[in-house]
Amino acid sequence: MDANYIAILPELILCGLGILVMVLIPSAGREGQARLGYLSLAGIVAALVASALLWGNQGTALFGMVFQDAFGNFSRILLLFASGSIALIALPYLRREGILMGEFFCLLLFATAGMTFMATSADLVMTFLGLETLSIATYVLAGFRSKDLRSVESAWKYFILGAFSTAFMLYGIAFIYGTAGSTKYQAIAEAVSRDGGLPITFAVGVGLLVVGFGFKVAMAPFHVWAPDVYQGAPLPVTSHLAVGSKAAAFVALLRIFQQVFPGLEGDWNFVFWTGAVLTMAIGNIAALAQSNIKRMLAYSSVAHAGYLLVGMAAGNPLGAQGILFYLAAYAFMTIGALAVVQVLSRPGEAGIDLDDYKGIGFRFPFLSVSLSVFLISLAGIPATAGFMGKFFIFSAAVQERLYWLVVIAVLTSAIGLYYYLRVIVLMFMHEAESEPPAPTLQPSLRAVIGLLILGTLVFGLYPAPLLELANQAVQF
Amino acid sequence: MVPTSHYLILGAILFAIGSFGVIFRRNAITMFMCVEIMLNAVNLTLVAYSRSFNQVDGQIFVIFVMVVAAAEAAVGLALIVLLNKRRGTLDVDQIDTMRW
Amino acid sequence: MFDGYLLSLILALPALGAAVLAFLPAENRSLLRNVALAACLAAFAASLLLWTGFDPSTSNMQFVEDHAWFELGGFQARYALGIDGISLFLVLLTTLIMPLCILASTHIKKHLKAYLCSMLALQVGMMGVFIALDLVLFYLFWEVMLIPMYMLIGVWGGQRRIYAAIKFFLYTAAGSLLMLAALITLYQYNVTPNFNIVEITGALSDGRISIPEGTAYWLFLAFFLAFAIKVPLFPFHTWLPDAHVEAPTAGSVILAGVLLKMGTYGLLRFCLPLFPEIALQMEPTISCLAIIAIIYGALVAMVQPDVKKLVAYSSVSHMGLIVLGIFAFNLQALEGATFQMLNHGISTGGLFLLVGMIYDRRHTRLIEDFGGLAQVMPRYAVFFMIITLSSIGLPGLNGFVGEYLTLQGTFLANPVYAAFAATGVILSAVYMLWMYQRVFLGKITGEANRQLADLNLREMAVLMPLVLLALWMGVQSSQFLRPMDASIQKVVDRIEQAREPQSFRVENLGR
Amino acid sequence: MLESFWILLLFPLAGAAVNGLCGKRLPHKLIGLIACGAVLASFLVAALAFVELTGRAADDRLVTVSLFTWIEAGEFVSRAAFLFDPLSAVMILIVTGVGFLIHVYSIGYMHGEDGYYRYFSYLNLFIFMMSLLVLGDNFLVMFVGWEGVGLCSYLLIGYYFKERFAGDAAKKAFVVNRVGDFAFLLGLFLIFREFGSITYLDAFQSVQSSYPGMETGFGILSLITLLLFIGATGKSAQTPLYVWLPDAMAGPTPVSALIHAATMVTAGVYMIARCSPLYSRAPETLLIVAVVGAATALLAALIAIGQRDIKKVLAYSTVSQLGYMFVACGVGAYAAGIFHLMTHAFFKALLFLGSGSVILAMHHQQNIFKMGGLKKYLPYTWGVMLVATLAIAGVPGLSGFFSKDEILWQAFSSPQGHPLIWALGVAVAGLTAFYMFRMLFLTFHGQERIEMGHHDDSHGEDDHSHHDAKPQEPGWSVRGPLGVLAVLSVLGGLVGLPAWLASTNQLHHFLEPSFHYQFVPEAHGEHSHALEMGLAGVTTLIGLMGIFVAYTAYLRRPHLPEQVSQRLSGLYRLIRQKFLVDEAYDAVIIRPTHWLSKNVLWKVFDDGVIDGAVNGTATVVQIWAQQLRKIQNGYVRSYATWILLGTALLFAYFSYFAA
């Protein structure tokens, strides 16, 4: 038991840099804020490199509060990649909206640190702290366009519901602590395997824990906040909510349920089964009726939580591997799609109704084709990472003989095809109703979008490398 | 000595009060206060368990929770101020710009 | 010359063409067309090597390429390509139809670059379906080709193109998603280290893999549904008329010429060898649907006011015959059905090309708008006649051979089915000739028809290969049948094995 | 030449190809020359091969040549192989011989028509297809020819495609034939299933070994033969599928002569003769064939009486005569059938060509009531027509007499025959004589009622210039073939003299080897020559009576027909309206099918039920979507309630499970 600060080097970099940025904000001046953004980006990249270098380490660190393992590092890299892309995408957005302030990046850094802690945490206290670091930073981020009521409303709804569900989760942690006598994962796992039939309080504790994570990943019926909050939050924050915070919650869930409670199998995979079905159905069906692309993507994000929950319901290593792969694929396509939406939108987040997409297909080919690729991937059509992810997760579910779950998943994704395709229909097959000015596409954004497309397609055609890494990651 | 279960039951009652408060109160600040009640109910539970185990882990956790709650309160109250500014009311039932 | 990567080359050439197109200026239309055409022709030339190098004496896969792709839960999905007698000609059909389609697309002015890219992407997808041996790879290609087709219908289609495109996509995708579920389930029983269809079939037939009958039943249904929708078999056919009517000419040609074959190919390659027992059990139901499709498609075709819709419903009828042949489970019927797949590609593809040509001139496809065209467009009338005759199975042309063998085989399996199915022979003559009469014969109606120009050289160049092929296949049929022999015999043997559960079980006990 | 007889196929094919592909640019003379030359070459090859064949021993008169394997799938093999034996030799001589004459005739007849090259190309193609049909050594090659001649018939009937009726008639011919082909195909399938081969010789051998005697009851053989026969009723215009032939007269007259009288329509008879090993073992089918043949003969003869169009009279006459041939087959007298086929080819071709000559002279007037007295203007045509009419009427000494008489004798005396069938045949003979002479008298004799035709502007511009001119004899190319055919019509009967006139019936004798595998039942008893002669006398008498009645009604007392028709108005109307068969088909089959397809299958089932279900699913999902989004009402308190509800459920579930 020692500190071994090297093991949490990425988090140290993030937090340190976050503090530094916070300190520098006043002195940077108006023009310097962008430079703070790049500084943060550099920090995220550095953290990413650090995580990569830590690949291969084993054991625990920080006095047993965090694990060092492939799973943690894989998740870290994934989360850092998401945050890095979001930081890069956010810069032109913030400038356009006139809210280019260093606070954004500093909050993003803290949120990222919270996420990576969730991924490596070995203790419920640590998990809670990570979650809260993430949440509190994100509450603020959601309201970052403070001049706009929608953004504030979004932040408020996220905040109050987030705090509400956190309370449930905390209560759950309290029960688990009260039964197992410790908040350490290992100790809890030992307690579970030692006296198989744990008292009701433990089961209830686990249930309440699911509420907290279910809220974060937008599992029905705890998804109710997601559409409103996603819609109101600034676009890069929507990305962050949809990808970063969801992925962090999923990896934490995975670790808890795969590593700590494997003995509970029969009980909780029914919960995930039901949750998955509800989530997929509600997400996909409600998305059909949306007229705002951001809100539609919010529902789509709910639906994808459902697919990921299918992997949770499977509860086997294959499922874990599939979830990790899917999360990566999901990061590519969702960040990409929202980035294109951002480019196509006008200041004040205008022009994000589906009708605004009519006939733009052949006018802005790069953007339209990119958006199409991301949507196709989200729809799970092959040659994209989205398909591979679904394929792996469904395979895992079938391995556990969850045939009906897979059939439902397949049917709901068939419904989902409709709304993804509708955007393509609007872009390419309708005539434009007005002549919107050409959007400006910064080189950096073009590069990010290009990179994300590359990721979507390459891992769609040749998933082996990522899949292999994910495989290593789930060897707990 | 009061048995642990009494603290737990008290905690549960507090928690229930808090959660129903969130649902039934329409004022933003009151809602937030109800969430705080829930957090404190959890704190009580943690402390009770901690005492029954004769260890400090739970109590340390409570301190973390309090810190987090404080941070949350800071952010939350700031948001409520902002909300009041933008919407001109704290009645949460009138804050429904985004729906369906 | 290209041993070991010929199939990859054929697959890559159109993709390469699309990549090159992406970097060419959109204004230079003829350059774009020529590049696309060159890519297609190159693929066609390469595919001819397949034929010359094909060994008809074996049922093994040939031109095999097999590389690791990815590994999942102990299984390996592999980049495995190969062809046998069943897929050989389907590949050739694809590579032949594509350049013709590009030649026939001069009326496309809007977004030409995207159009050509879609076509080439479509070709990659379709080719892949026919040559993939790995189930995952197969599924990948199977779905990939939906998107470009969807774009072709939706962007370059007619009035109700959006409805038709979405209908096409959702209908077919819904089916294929269920197939995905079945495909995944199949792996649960797999004991071979990978998802190679040949190996899985082999393992199934020697009993190393056994699937409980209840499961096999559902798996079969899922596969079958996906293929039946693609075929399309009654009652899953209603996407077809809409898609055909709205699609641009080349889209319709590809749809009829190649895409539908993917369904019947799937039945032949997957449904039968994987689940022969269930196929045997389900045969009465499926055969009945096929017979209904034959008669129903023909009857509904008869009363269509729109030429394209008529041809679309005739496809339903023809494809029904192919399905019936496939489920007759004997060599004659299966070879006939496979041959008929090629025929249908040529004759129906040709009909759509012809309809497209008149649509370019008159911008209508309603039969009642035409009349007496034989007088103003004699060459057109002749080509139309020949293709019509091929479609209605006139002996001496290709259609007859396929129809005859299929029906002969079906008759051997069940005379009553054959008797019902053979009514299609009468009905096809009724609807095609009636349509021909109303469009071409009689007095010229309407001033617009009087002004029509006859076919030009380019259009004749598009049609000529199909006509020659129709003749060649009709006369030298055995050249096309012989390479199929061994591969189809293998499918038949597989079914025969399943027919005799006794000996099969004994074999299992011995292990 | 015998071993390479198959090259006779190539000439017409080449002729068709040359004329079809580049005929547009060739001069008309050359087109005619190519076409006629091709058929002549075929005829010469056939003749040489025939001569060589006769030179061989009787049991050696069979040559097969296999060119390539056409279709092969497992045991199913069909080669592009050809068979030359006495039967096919006779047939091919008729086809190419009569075909050549009609080609020559066409040069004159079609002069100045649009699409001259097209016509000759089709005609050559027809000869090719007919040769395939006749020479094929297996059922499938025969079927190629079978359908191929159908195609040519379609193309040639629709030759005047600018006219609506031509298109209608062509389509009708094809479709009705397809109905027959449907059965024919089923017959082929059954043959392959039962005998394992579709090659004639193999299949017949197999029949012989598995059926040493006749089949008892209605078994597989009867089914096979019945199915094939249904095919034949389509091609050879027998009841109930004869309806297309009268309409087929829409084509140019030489086409009617060649295809719809002399050759194609007799394909069914040839097919049955070829399959005699099957038919002779299936008495049940034979009875059906005989009855259908006799009934058709009678029905068509009755209808012919009421026709006013010269070609329609001939068309129904053809149907009727084909009925005779089927009667012959039906009583097991295949050679007699082929004999009548041959003589019929001569005199009916002559009749058609003669009528063509009349039509040409009358500027496409075809109504015999608008002719009359033409003998004066067209003496040559009248002469040859008279010969042909006498031949068909069965006047002794002419070809028709011998062949018809043999059929009737066989119908009476053969084990499968029956006096009733004979009686029917005799009655038809009388009717035939009556309506043929009715036609002849109305056309060439009596009052002049000449009204020139106003044929459509489309054919031959020069038609207009001399509308008022009197009818004129056509040129040499028309007259020449008429003469040759007239000679054949007179002498053609000599190859098959009956037993009471000659010691051997040469045609019978020659054809014998082709019926090698035939099962010949034992005759029930001896019939004397005297009986045969007597019956012939009866037939002749009846025929002469028919002629006399026609003479009385149409020359001596021209008002008689009107009186009779008024007296028997019901029957007369029925005959005039061709027993309403077409109308019945229309009302019972065509209209209901069309209505059903359009209103029920398409509009209700396809668009309504199936598409309704598909679109309905989409609508239902959309409705769900509208409902589900309502959950998201924007109120944070309601969201909190959902969360609490979910928690409660989880709580309940976990406490239940742990307990």
Image (spheres, coloured by chain):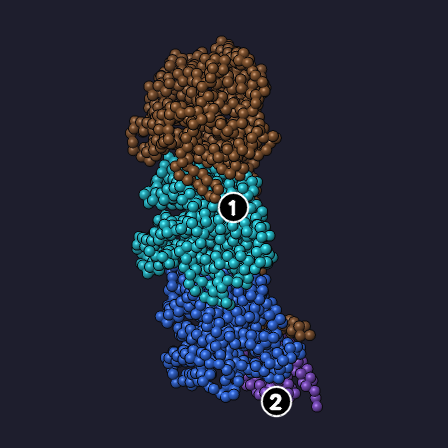
Looking at the picture, tell me which residue is in the foreground, A310 or D137. Answer: D137
In this view of the protein, which residue sits in the foreground, C352 or C212?
A: C212
Residue B98 appears left or right of C442 = right
Check disc 2 and report its element: helix, strand or loop.
loop
Chain A appears in which tint?
blue
Chain letter for brown? D
Mark in the foreground, 2 or 1:
1
Amino acid beneath label 2: Gln
Seen at 39% across and 29% down, the residue is: D127
Name above or below for residue D204 compared with residue A361. above
Q: Residue D546 at x, y = what percent?
A: 52, 13
- Where is D333 relative to C460, above or below? above
**Can residue A338 be seen?**
no
Determine the chain carrying the residue at label 2: B
Give the number of the disc on residue C490.
none
Q: Which residue is tagged 1?
A: C330
**Which residue shows up at 48% across the image and 13% down it?**
D501
In the figure, the shade used to draw chain C is cyan
Q: Position of residue A52 (x, y in %)?
A: 43, 78
The residue that label 2 is drawn on is: B55
The residue that appears at 43% across and 46% down in the rendered structure is C482
Question: Relative to C325, does residue D172 appear above or below in the rendering?
Answer: above
Kindly tell me whether residue D591 is visible in this rendering.
yes
Chain letter matching colour purple: B
Residue occupying the point 46% across, 26% down: D513
Please tell me how many numbered marks the rendered image carries: 2
